[in-house]
Each structure stands twice: as structure tokens, then as C-alpha cells.
């Protein structure tokens, strides 16, 4: 009798085992049983040849009507063509170089034939079908039951390994199966009324009826969610055991002084999350928290307050930003918000003051040297930087908190590289600008505590978004430029976003034709900026910004824009995340259909940050009924980033939903769909938490511990080290 971890060779023999391995990397009995059917064919579908469609995986019950063997012209080899009929129609079966089958497929004999319907010379046929002849006098129903079962599973198959053959392998494996130990604790299984693992595996492949198949599938889908959540909860519990420095805020410190000077009041959400974070930081194990929030909800201040709490306790905080534009902007924001509190060491500084250092790859040697020494000496309580922060030469005096801005731009290794620079495991706050649905967060960031900022600061006027179809109304593009001029005339500023830096990069834009032959491309920053400056926006101060410019140029441009010295910034998506200029009120996005839904939401979040209403115009040439247009309409219809991210995720493949961070476990997620199975994931999470609180090291659940250990081994270490 075989166990799940037994090699298939011992059950199915060398040849079959090799075919299964080559096709699907199936090695063990368990691997095979986890090759799940995609769907089932019901026996009632069996016999109607008249209704077969090309591409169908079918099994038919039919009688041999005629058969002929002929030589292939000009080549060696023969073709056996057998015509079968079920009364509704005829179907041809073809076999190459298997003339001997003619003896089995005698005219008048009945049999079951399975294969994929193909077309040849416009006639439907099965090439090399699998078949089972029914001996004269034997019970046809019986034979059908044996060959097809009531519900015939349909598997992902290859030409060498058709679905029916997999069915046969399954049946053999199931027949030889020893008792399967169920890793799922009884209390969990009973609470959900799930079948045992053995029942589930057997019923999934050879279901008595579709209800059984459904129950089996639900149980196995739950298992995927449950094991994953268990790993994440376990990981969280392990973090809790790490020893960190507790960072308590103190009265009369820099945080208090900062709060006193803050020109606005924190929103309710900001206050709650701040309290959560302060509580986390005061613990002697590391905080691992994700702060996700609606665009413009004010995450930066929440992060800054956490950093100041750590400074109060004598430690340092590092802020990792994905781009130099953003790092430089954070420095400006912090200096502005902190005022004299950032003048540590200077004569005018209050005693609580600290310094803010910036470390980027492109800064000059002198600036870098001074920043490095501020970080190493501890004089800088806050160190902002790009990837350059990870460099070997960067040392901290006492790194207590790492804040990662726009976490999706960083990999796990990068976070870990920074952690290494702390004496004890530092606290971690990761921020993401793209809000994601709850169960996606639970799955992707399941080992982090999640704080969500939904509300925007008071006094914001909502952003209005319109889709401008240049296909239908070319003149509307001129109106867009006119709107920019109007806003600028009132003292406001504008963004124009284009998908490309230069014209040569890519094929021409869909909307280039509008400007006639001589202009090749208005969807590139390099062509659009001078063109607008010379024509539609003549007289306005137009500047361009993109990733190929040097850090100095980018920084100077952003500073000038923030200072109101530039009216219109023509840019690529370098401004997508984080850029915060409250005086900008209009954004025009060229070829908007080239951007994703969440990305557009991010982009438009750059306007309407002050008290004046924001306007976002999405310019497209996509036809009214196209999916691209539907996405743009969705963006125009709602300002709810969670809703938009759901739309975005629904259009992606599951692997992309989970992102690269899940690569290790992705192969284990066969049935689970994070958006579809929300309820199940919630239940799995609650159960996983229950189990871990009952037995934090799983010692009361040896079967589960073993299953998790195996999964952890399979998953990339990369994944487990996440967070
Ligand atoms: P995001 O969450 O998109 O990163 P930011 O942190 O950049 O948002 O904040 C957006 C803008 O709102 C900033 O200019 C910030 O100073 C301002 N802001 C943040 N919190 C408040 C508040 N409670 N009241 C008023 N303005 C705020
Ligand atoms: Mg931000």
C-alpha cells in the first residue's frame, strides 16, 4: 500500500511515472493526487456525436461503422481510419502506424472512445483516442461506469498524456492508497464539516456525485488558505519572540514639540494608527506593521511621528524611499514640518532637536561624507535615503526603526540588508500607497499587522475625473490645455503625464495623428513638453521631468515646481507615487489607457492635495466599448482606491495578484483565488490563529507541524524571510 510520499514509479511503473514526471513534474503519489481535475464531464454528455465541438474533451459511446487502413503517400507509414456512430452522427478516429488496432476495432463492435475533438478536412475527428471495447454480451452500463465513472474528471493534459490516461493513473494510485493521515486538526475539520483528507482526495478524482466533488474541492481549497495562514501566523508569533529595544515616547521630547507645532489636526485615523504604532514601539519585540492608505490620506506624518518617537528614546530611524525624487521630497517635507527641531547642533535649536540626513547614490562626495558621519555618530536621528542606504559603508549609531515607503518597490533582501545595520532587530513600518482588499493584504502581508487609513484630511475637495476620448471628440484635447491655462491663470499648477520619455522608445502613440504628420509623437515627454510650451501652453512656464535626467536636474525641477516657479510639469510616471505639491490642481494623462487602474488612481492623487478642487483628465484613443475604456470609466467613476485595486487585481492572473513575494508558495496554491475566496480565507485565518494560540509551536499538532515544515522547505527561503 502506498503513502502520499511514496514514489510513483513503485505504483505505476517506470514508463508511466516518467511520462507524468516529464509532463507535470509529478514524482510522488501525493503529487499525482494534487493534480486536480479542472472540471467533470457528466455521463449524460457522453454519447452525442452530433453535438461535439472542436477542442472538447469527450468520451463517447459508439459502434464501429467502418474501418480502413491506407499507406501515407510518399512516406513510410499507414493511417487507420475508423468511423464510429452513435446514431446521432458519425465520427472518424485516426491512428498512425497502428494498423494492428483494426483487429480490435471490428465493424459492429461497441466501445467507449475518449479524446479531444479535432478538425481535419473540416471533419470532426479524434486522433489517437483512448478506447475501451465492450465485449459482446457484457453489460454496457457497467462498462460505461467502469470506463468513465459517472463523473469523468477532466485534467490539464498534454498530447502525450491525455486526460483519460491521467484518470487511469489516479484510479490506480487511489486503489493502492494506504490510509492517509489528515494533518487538519479534528476540531477544525469538524467545525466546517469537511471530509477527511483521504475522502477529499478520493472524491475529487472519483466523485460519487458533484456534491461530493464540491465538498472535496472546498476542503482542499481551505487547506491551501489554512496552511498559508498558519505559516504566516507562526512567523508572526516567532517575531514576537525576538528581542528588540523598546522605544517609549517621553514627555517633553521632540514628538511633543512636533505635535505642538503641527499646523493642522491629525485625522481620526491618523490618531488611532499613531496610537497603535506607539504601543508597538514600546514593546520589547519588533513591530512589523503595514500602513496602507488611500492616496493623500497622510501616511507621511504618521511615519514621521513614529520616527520621532524612536528619536525620543535615543534611537535613530531610517526612511527608505524608492526614488531620489521622493527621498528629496521627504527631506524637504521633514525639514519644513520640523523647523528648528531639525536643527540639532545649531545655536537656534531647541534641546530636543535632532538632524535629518539624506543619503542618495548621486550626491556629491562632500554631502555624502557629512551624511555618513551624521548617521554613524547618531547626530542624525532621522536618515532618509534611497537604495544607497543599503550600502556597506553606511553605519548607524543605534538604528531602532526602519520605515519603507512604497514597499512594493523594494524586495525582501533590501529590507533585510537594512535590518542588519541595527544591533538588535529593529522595528519595521512598511507603507504602501496602493490600498489592497483585506484578504489580499492578509495573504500577501499576513505576517504583518495592518493599519489602514481610509479617510482624507478635512477640507479636501474631491478630485473630478473625466475621460477625454480624442477619437470621438478631438477638440476636447484643446479644451484640456485650455483648462490648464485657466488654472495657471488663477495661480495654480498642473501636471501633464506621458507614458514615454522619448518618441523613439516605442511604437507611435494612438493619438499622434492629431498633430499631423510632422509631429511624430505627443505621448513622449521630450516631444510633448516643447510642443506645449510653443503652442497650446505658450507663455506658461513648462518644464519636463523624467527618469533619464540626473538626480540634480530632477531635484532642482521638483524644488522649482514645489516653489511655484514652474506652472506645468510634463512628466513620466516618476511622479506617480508620493509627490506632494498642494498647489497643483490639474492633471492631464496622455494615452491614459496605457496605465493600470491603480496607477491612474495614484497619479491623480497628485492633484487635489490642497483645499482647491482637483481635476484629472484621462486622454485616450481607445474606442467607447473597449475594455481599456471601461477601465478608464471605472477610474473616473470612483475615488475609492480599494475598489479600484480590486478591479485592477481581478484582471490579473493569480500569481500576479500575490506578487513575487509569494513565489515560493505559489505552486502550493492551486485552487485558492484570493479575491473569490475571501470568506474562506477569513475563516482559515481565524482557525490558524486559534491553533497557534492553543499551541504556539504546534507541538500539540505534530501532523500539522510536519506539513508546515514540508511547505516551508518547498517554499523559497526568500518567502519565509519576508518582513
Ligand atoms: P499619502 O498618504 O498619499 O502619502 P501624504 O502623507 O503625502 O499622503 O499627505 C498628503 C498631504 O496632506 C500632505 O501635504 C500632508 O501635509 C497633508 N496632511 C496630512 N495629514 C493632514 C491632516 N491631518 N490635516 C491636513 N493636512 C494633512
Ligand atoms: Mg506618500
Image (cartoon, helix red, strand yellow):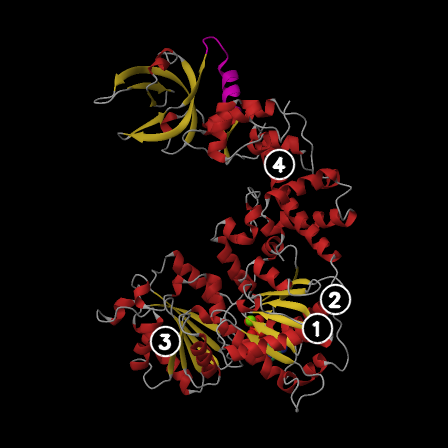
Classify mark 4: residues with Cα within 10 Å, few (<14), some (14-19) or many (20+).
Answer: some
What range of the chain is rendered magenta? 135-150
Q: Secondary structure at mark 2?
A: loop
Sequence-wise first label, 4 or 1: 4
Q: Nearer the viewer, residue 331 or 126?
A: 331
Q: Secondary structure at mark 3?
A: helix
Mark toward the viewer: 4 or 1: 1
The residue under label 1 is 315
Mark toward the viewer: 2 or 4: 2
The answer to whether marks 2 and 1 mark residues whose Cβ atoms lie closer than 8 Å is yes
The answer to whether marks 1 and 3 mark residues whose Cβ atoms lie closer than 8 Å is no
Residue shown at 32%/62% (left/top)? Answer: 506
Q: CA distance from mark 2 to mark 1?
A: 9 Å
The residue under label 4 is 215
Q: CA distance from mark 4 to mark 1?
A: 54 Å
Mark toward the viewer: 2 or 3: 2
Q: CA distance from mark 2 to mark 3?
A: 54 Å
Where does residue 676 sit, x and y in percent of width and height? 56, 49
Sequence-wise first label, 2 or 3: 2
Q: Secondary structure at mark 4?
A: helix
Amino acid at each position: 500500500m502506498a503513502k502520499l510520499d511514496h514514489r510513483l514509479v513503485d505504483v505505476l511503473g517506470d514508463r508511466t511515472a516518467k511520462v507524468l514526471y516529464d509532463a507535470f513534474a509529478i514524482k510522488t503519489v501525493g503529487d499525482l493526487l494534487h493534480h486536480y481535475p479542472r472540471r467533470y464531464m457528466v455521463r449524460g454528455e457522453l454519447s452525442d456525436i452530433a453535438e461535439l465541438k472542436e477542442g472538447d474533451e469527450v468520451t463517447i459511446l459508439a459502434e464501429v461503422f467502418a474501418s480502413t487502413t491506407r499507406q501515407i503517400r510518399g512516406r513510410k507509414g499507414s493511417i487507420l481510419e475508423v468511423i464510429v456512430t452513435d446514431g446521432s452522427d458519425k465520427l472518424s478516429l485516426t491512428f498512425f502506424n497502428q494498423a494492428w488496432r483494426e483487429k480490435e476495432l471490428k465493424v459492429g463492435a461497441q466501445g467507449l472512445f475518449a479524446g479531444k475533438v479535432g478538425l481535419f478536412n473540416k471533419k470532426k475527428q479524434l486522433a489517437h483516442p483512448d478506447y475501451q471495447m465492450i465485449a459482446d454480451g457484457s453489460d454496457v452500463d457497467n462498462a460505461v461506469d467502469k470506463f468513465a465513472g459517472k463523473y469523468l474528471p477532466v485534467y490539464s493534459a498534454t498530447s502525450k498524456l491525455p486526460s483519460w490516461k491521467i484518470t487511469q493513473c489516479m484510479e490506480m494510485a487511489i486503489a493502492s492508497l494506504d490510509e492517509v493521515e489528515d494533518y487538519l486538526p479534528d476540531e477544525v475539520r469538524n467545525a466546517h464539516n469537511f471530509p477527511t483528507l483521504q475522502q477529499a482526495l478520493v472524491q475529487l478524482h472519483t466523485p460519487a456525485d458533484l456534491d461530493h466533488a464540491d465538498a472535496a474541492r472546498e476542503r482542499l481549497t481551505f487547506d491551501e488558505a489554512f496552511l498559508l495562514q498558519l505559516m504566516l501566523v507562526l512567523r508572526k508569533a516567532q517575531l514576537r519572540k525576538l528581542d528588540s529595544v523598546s522605544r517609549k515616547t517621553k514627555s517633553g521630547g521632540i514628538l511633543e514639540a512636533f505635535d505642538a507645532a503641527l499646523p493642522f489636526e491629525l485625522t481620526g485615523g491618523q490618531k488611532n494608527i499613531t496610537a497603535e504604532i506607539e504601543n508597538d514601539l514600546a514593546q520589547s519585540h519588533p513591530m512589523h506593521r503595514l500602513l496602507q492608505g488611500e492616496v493623500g490620506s497622510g501616511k507621511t506624518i504618521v511615519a514621521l511621528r513614529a520616527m520621532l518617537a524612536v528619536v525620543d528614546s535615543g534611537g535613530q530611524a531610517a526612511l527608505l524611499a524608492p526614488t531620489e525624487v521622493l527621498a528629496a521630497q521627504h527631506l524637504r517635507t521633514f525639514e519644513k514640518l520640523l523647523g528648528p527641531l531639525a536643527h540639532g547642533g545649531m545655536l537656534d535649536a531647541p534641546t530636543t532637536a535632532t538632524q535629518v540626513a539624506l543619503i542618495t547614490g548621486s550626491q556629491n562626495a562632500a554631502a555624502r561624507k557629512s551624511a555618513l558621519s551624521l548617521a554613524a555618530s547618531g547626530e542624525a536621528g532621522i536618515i532618509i535615503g534611497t537604495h544607497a542606504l543599503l550600502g556597506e559603508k553606511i553605519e548607524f549609531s543605534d538604528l531602532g526603526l526602519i520605515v519603507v515607503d512604497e514597499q512594493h518597490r523594494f524586495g525582501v533582501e533590501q529590507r533585510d540588508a537594512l535590518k542588519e545595520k541595527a544591533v538588535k532587530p529593529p522595528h519595521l513600518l512598511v507603507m504602501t500607497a496602493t490600498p489592497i482588499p483585506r484578504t489580499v493584504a492578509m495573504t500577501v502581508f499576513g505576517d504583518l499587522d495592518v493599519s489602514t487609513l481610509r479617510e482624507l484630511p478635512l477640507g479636501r475637495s474631491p478630485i473630478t475625473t473625466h475621460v477625454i476620448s480624442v477619437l470621438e471628440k478631438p477638440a476636447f484635447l484643446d479644451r484640456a490645455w485650455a483648462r490648464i491655462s485657466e488654472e495657471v491663470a488663477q495661480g495654480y499648477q498642473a501636471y501633464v503625464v506621458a507614458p514615454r520619455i522619448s518618441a523613439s522608445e516605442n511604437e507611435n502613440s494612438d493619438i499622434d495623428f492629431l498633430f499631423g504628420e510632422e509631429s511624430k509623437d505627443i505621448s513622449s515627454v521630450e516631444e510633448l513638453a516643447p510642443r506645449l510650451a510653443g503652442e497650446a501652453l505658450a507663455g506658461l512656464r513648462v518644464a519636463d521631468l523624467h527618469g533619464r535626467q540626473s538626480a540634480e536636474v530632477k531635484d532642482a525641477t521638483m524644488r522649482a515646481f514645489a516653489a511655484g516657479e514652474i506652472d506645468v510639469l510634463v512628466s513620466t510616471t516618476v511622479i506617480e507615487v508620493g509627490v506632494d505639491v498642494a498647489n497643483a490642481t490639474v492633471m492631464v494623462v496622455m494615452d491614459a489607457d496605457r496605465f493600470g487602474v491603480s496607477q491612474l488612481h495614484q497619479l491623480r492623487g497628485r492633484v487635489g492635495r490642497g483645499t482647491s478642487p482637483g481635476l484629472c483628465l484621462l486622454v485616450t484613443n481607445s474606442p467607447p466599448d473597449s475594455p481599456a475604456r471601461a477601465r478608464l470609466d471605472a477610474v473616473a467613476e470612483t475615488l475609492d482606491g480599494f475598489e479600484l485595486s480590486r478591479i485592477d487585481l481581478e484582471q490579473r492572473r493569480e500569481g500576479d495578484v500575490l506578487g513575487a513575494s509569494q513565489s515560493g508558495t505559489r505552486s502550493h496554491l492551486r485552487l485558492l483565488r484570493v479575491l473569490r475566496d475571501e470568506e474562506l480565507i477569513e475563516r482559515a485565518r481565524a482557525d490558524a490563529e486559534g491553533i497557534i494560540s492553543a499551541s504556539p509551536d504546534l507541538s500539540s499538532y505534530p501532523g500539522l507541524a510536519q506539513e508546515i515544515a514540508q511547505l516551508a522547505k518547498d517554499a523559497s527561503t526568500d518567502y519565509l524571510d519576508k518582513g
